[in-house]
Image: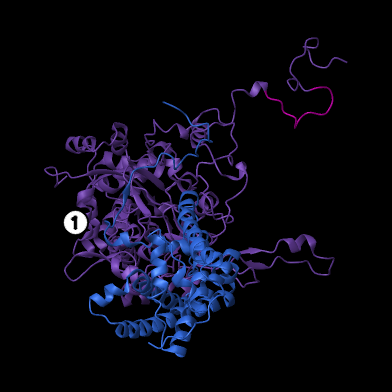
Chain colours: A blue, B purple
Amino acid sequence: MTAPARPVTLAVDTGTGGILLWVVLPYVCLAVFVLGHVWRYRYDKFGWTTRSSQLYERRLLRIGSPLFHFGILVVLLGHIGGLVIPKSWTEAVGVGEHTYHVGAVVLGTVAGVATLGGLAVLIYRRRTVGPVFSATTRNDKAMYVFLALTIVLGLSATVAANAVGGGYDYRETISPWFRSLFYLQPDPEPMTGAPILFQLHAISALLLFAFWPFTRLVHMLTAPLGYLTRPYIVYRSRDPRLAAREPRRGWERTGS
Amino acid sequence: MPRGEAGIGRVMAQMAMVMNLDKCIGCHTCSVTCKQAWTNRTGVEYVWFNNVETRPGQGYPRRYEDQDTWKGGWELNRKGRLTLKAGGRFKKLVQIFSNPVLPSLDDYYEPWTYDYETLTNAPLQEHTPVARPKSLISGKDMKISWSANWDDDLAGSAATGEKDVLLNQVSEKIKLEFEQTFMFYLPRICEHCLNPSCAASCPSGAIYKRTEDGIVLVDQDRCRGWRMCVTGCPYKKVYFNHRTGKAEKCTFCFPRVEVGLPTVCSETCVGRLRYIGLVLYDADRVLEAASTTDEKDLYEAQRQVFLDPNSPDVIAAAEREGIPRDWIEAARRSPVHALISTYKMALPLHPEYRTLPMVWYIPPLSPVVDAVRDTGRDAEDHRNLFAAVDALRIPVDYLAQLFTAGDPAPVDAVLRRLAAMRAYMRDINLGREPDASIPREVGMSEEQMYDMYRLLALAKYDERYVIPPAHAEQAHQLEELATECSLDYEGGPGMGGSGPFGETSGGAVPIAVENYRALRDRQTSDTSAAPTDKATRVNLLDWDGRGRPPGLFPPGETDDEGPAS
C-alpha cells in the first residue's frame, strides 16, 4: 500500500478538539438517536409513518424509490461489514486486504451510485411534482439536506481515495475508532489521522443520526420483518380505551 | 343444520349488515352522513367509507372489480391453497418501496373545493363573480371531470356503462341486448370480512379483526403507511390518508355499535334498507370455506360457516368461548341471520374474492318488475313475475356476477321469493283470500312469508337493528362527564395545542369526542325533544323585551312575583 505521506485532515489533534469531535459528538448523537426514538415512539406513534406520496405520483417513484432504498440497504450492509467486523476476522476466513478492497469498491460504487441516482430522482420528483412538493415539510427538507450531504460525502471520500492513492484502508483507522465507542473505551486517536472527506462524512452521519428520530426516517426502525412470520389474520380484543378519551392526568378513576 | 353439530370449532360473533337493494333510491344520504361523521378531514377528502354506485357502472374507484389489474383478494394457487392474489409475504416486502398496483388518485378522483371567497370580496363588476373549483391536492384551478359518483344514474349510457367490469364478463348476447337498460343502486361499505385480505396484506400487522364483534379496524398507532392493504382489499375499501400517511377504513361506527346504536349510514338510511345484527360462525371453518375449489360454491360454503344460534349445541359452544348470554340472545333475534340463513334472501357481494364478506345484499327485483310493467302485464302477479325472472336473463346474469360468482340459480331463487312475497301480500292487502300455493311454490310457509314481509317491507327500527351493546362494565371511561369540553382530552387542543411536528403528529384524536351513551339515551328516550326540566327553562326568543321573563333570575328575597316596578 502506498499510503499518502500525511493525508489532509481536519486540523485537530487528539487534543480537546479531537475528543470533542470523535468522543463527545458521537456519544451525544447516539444518545439522542436512542433516546429520541424512545421518546418519539412513546409520544408520537401516530406520526410514525413513511408518509408515502405514492398516491400523488407513481411513475417517478417507481424508478427512484426502489433504486434508493435497495441501494441504501446494500450501503448499510457494506458499512456493517467495514465498520463492525474487524479486519482480523475477514482475514481469518481467508479474505485478503486486496480481495476485500476490490469487493468493497465494486459493490460500494454500484450501491452508492444506485442510492445517489435514486435520491436524485426522488428529490427531483419532490421538487417538480406539485402535490408532492406541497406535502413536503421544512423538516423533510432539512432531512434531505443531511441525508444527501452524508451520501455525497461518503461516496466522494471513497472515489477520491481510490482515484488519488489506490484506496484508503479505513479498516485500520475508522473502524477501530467506531468499535472503540461501543467498547466504552473511546479512542479518538485513529480518527484524527483519517482523510478529511472521511472525517466530514463521519461528522455529517453523526449529525444525521441525531436528527433521525425527529424525521420521517424513523420508518426504517419499524421495517416490517415480523410480517414474514406472523399469521395472516390478526385478531385483537376490543380496546376499552379506544372508544373513550383518556381521563386527564390526575383524574383517573381508582378502584371500580 | 346439516353438518357440524358433531364438531363445532371456535365460535365467534360477527356484527354484519344486510342491504335490501330493492328499497335503495340512490339518495346518497348514507354517503353524506358517513362523510360528515368520518372523512370530512384533510387527507381523506377523496375518501368515502360508504359510497353508492349506480349499476351497471364503473364503481368507485373506477373499475375496482377488475382484479386482473388490481390484484385484490385471495386466489387458489396451483396446489389449491389460498394465497393473496397480489403475492405472498416475501413479494410484498420486496415491493414495499413502490407498490406496483396501488390505485392512484386519478382512479378515485381529485378532490376539490370552490373559491367561495371571490363571491364576497370580488370588486364591483358587470358580471357576477363565480366560485372556481380549486384542487384540494395542488390548490390550483382544476377542471372537474370525475368524482365518487360521477356516473350516478347513467347506467345505460355508452360513456360509462361499457366500462363496467361485470358487463364485460357476461356473455356477448347480453351486451347486445344492453339497449334494454336496467339500473339499480349498490351502496357499499367495508365488508368486515371473515377472511380479510387487507389484514393479511398489512406488513405491520396494524389491521386487526376484533374478537368480540368481528369489526375490522386499522390501528392508527401501528400503521406505518406501507399501503399494501389498499391493494389487498378487492373492494378497495381501505384508503390511504395522504396527509397523515396512514390507512383508514370504515369502522362499522364501532363507538356507536358498542353502545347499541346502529351505524351512521344505517341510522340515516331514508329507505330503511339496512339491517344490522349478529351472526355466529365457526372460525375454524373459515379457511376451509375460503379455499372452496369452485367459485360458484363459495356462497354456499360461506353459509355453511355460519352457526344456527337456536341450536343448543351452538349455544353451549358459544358460552364456552365466552360469548355473553345477551349476545347469543341477540344472535337469535338477528335480522341478518334471518335474511341469510332462514329466508336465504341475502347474498354476499363478490364471494369469488374469497374474503368471506359480511355485508350481504338482497338483489333487487325492481328491474324485473319494471320490465313486466313495460309489457303491459300485471307486474304484481307471481306467474308473470316468475316467467319474467326466467325470461329476463340480463338482470339475473348481471346480479349473479355480483353476488354468486356467476351462478344464476341462487339469484333466481331469491327473486322468485321476492316475487312470491309481492303477489301473496297483494292479496292480503286487497282483502282477498291469501293464496297459500304462492309461498309453497318457493318453498316457504305462509307464516314465514308474512314474517319475511314484516322484516323486509315494514322494517321496524327495533327489528332492523338488533345490536347488543359491548360489555364494558369495567370501562368507566365510556361514561364521560358531560361537563368536560369535547376537545379537552389529554394532549388535545383543549390542553394546549397540537403536537410538535404539526397537525399530524402527537396522538390521534380520540373518536369518542361525543358521549355515545348520552347520544343513545337522547335518541331512544321518549323525552328527547321535550326535556324534563323544560318548566325551569327560559325562552328568550319570544321575550318581547318588556318586563322580566319569569325564571330568568333566581327568586329574590323581596320580589318573588316577577317585576317589582
Task: Residue B88 in the image: state x and y as whole percent.
Answer: 28, 67
Q: Quadrant of residue A233?
A: bottom left
Please tell me whether mark 1 sits on a helix, a strand or a loop.
helix
Task: Residue B313 in the image: state x and y as whole percent.
Answer: 17, 37
Q: Is residue B7 magenta?
A: no
Mark 1 is on which residue type? Answer: Glu
Q: Is residue A52 visible?
A: yes
Magenta segment range? B537-548
Q: Is residue B503 left or right of residue B2?
A: right
Instruction: Count neighbours of disc 1 (C-alpha within 10 A) and say few if under 14, some if 14 to 19, many if 20 or more.
Output: some
- When the figure is inspected, residue A222 is found, relative to residue B478, above or below; the finding is below
Q: Is residue B206 left or right of residue B547?
A: left
In the current view of this chain or complex, which residue is farthest to the top? B558
Question: Which residue is disc 1 drawn over?
Answer: B288
Q: Is residue B538 magenta?
A: yes
For the C terminus of chain B, the quadrant is top right
For the N terminus of chain B, the quadrant is top left
Task: Residue B301 in the image: state x and y as whole percent.
Answer: 21, 55
- When the figure is inspected, residue B372 is found, relative to residue B459, above or below; the finding is below
